[in-house]
Image (cartoon, coloured by chain):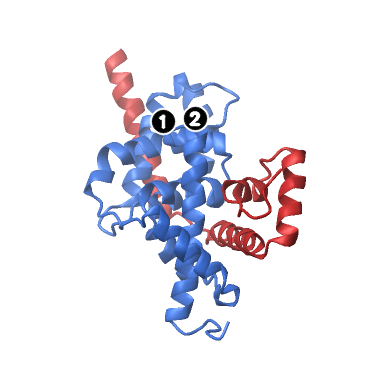
Amino acid sequence: MLDLRADFEAQALPWMDTLYRFALRLLSSAKEEPADLVQETYLRAYRSFYQFKQGSNCKSWLFQIMYSIFVNQYRRKQKEPETLAFHELEKRFIASVQQPNCFEKRASDVERALKRLPEEFRTAILLVDVEELSYEEAAVAMNCPVGTIRSRLFRARKLLYISLVEYARANGYADKSA
Amino acid sequence: MTDPGTHLDDELQDFIDGRLTPDKVTEVESHINHCKICRSKIDALQKAKQAAAGAAEIPVSSDLRKKIIDSLNQEDASQKKKND
């Protein structure tokens, strides 16, 4: 048991900051405690560590466990932001790309915009762009086909861009003449 | 070959993520050379990707580390009890 514990700590604990950050951004409600989600993830991971294939990617395995707990215990309680219909999204994306001088990526705005993405899009962009998983690893973590990750990520990036442009314009720190 | 009168969509994301075959890369490059809208879309997608990638690091509190170590200790203790 000692070897298993030491092995688990060596492989899994270095990802604690990463998992905490992901949990914090995954949980859209301030009422939910990201630390509880991280703790539950580590406990589940430890209990099933004997099944973990040595040499495979521990980081994406931990994300998979965390996302599964999130889906089963947290997601239903969250108030989800409304998503844009496909045509509306395209229309606003085209309008936004035509105002390139209005794009600002202030850290607080990026956080706000990420939180406001519909959960499945938010998760895809968090896994691929923020946490640098490959499409294939993100698909395992979200338990969906690679093509689904691709389309969720595409919509997430478009929504993030629209949101940052519209927020910069609304708050007057973008070049409105552009 | 991409129809010069049609705008690209999915291919633009595959282009910025390096998921296209060399032939397809050439095709997209040739299209964006003359299509301002698709150039702007690529620029926007790249900016969104970089904005997300630049999201801040958030350090974990030492309390959480302690909580996790404690819960692993409890798990070991309860397994030991079962086995004794």
The reply to whether label 1 and label 2 mark residues of one chain is yes
Disc 1 residue type?
Ala
Disc 2 residue type?
Phe
In the rendered structure, the residue with mark 1 lies on which chain? A
Residue at 43% over, 36% down: A142
Q: Which residue is mark 2?
A: A8
**Residue A115 vertical position relative to residue A56 in the rendered view, above or below:** below
Discs 1, 2 touching: Cβ within 8 Å: yes
Judge whether residue A123 can be spotted in this image.
Answer: yes
**Residue A50 vertical position relative to residue A150 in the rendered view, above or below:** above
In the rendered structure, the colour chosen for chain B is: red
**Left-right relation of A123 to A72:** right
Q: Quadrant of the C terminus of chain A?
A: bottom right
Q: Which residue is mark 1?
A: A45
Circle nearer the viewer, 1 or 2:
1
Judge whether residue A61 can be spotted in this image.
Answer: no
x and y, in percent, of residue B73 in the image: 36, 33
x and y, in percent, of residue A138 in the image: 50, 38
Locate residue B70: give its quadrant: top left
Q: Secondary structure at mark 2?
A: helix
Residue at 25% over, 55% down: A79
Q: Nearer the viewer, residue A17 or B5?
A: B5
Label 1 and label 2: CA atoms lie apart by 9 Å
Residue at 53% over, 21% down: A53
In the rendered structure, the residue with mark 2 lies on which chain? A
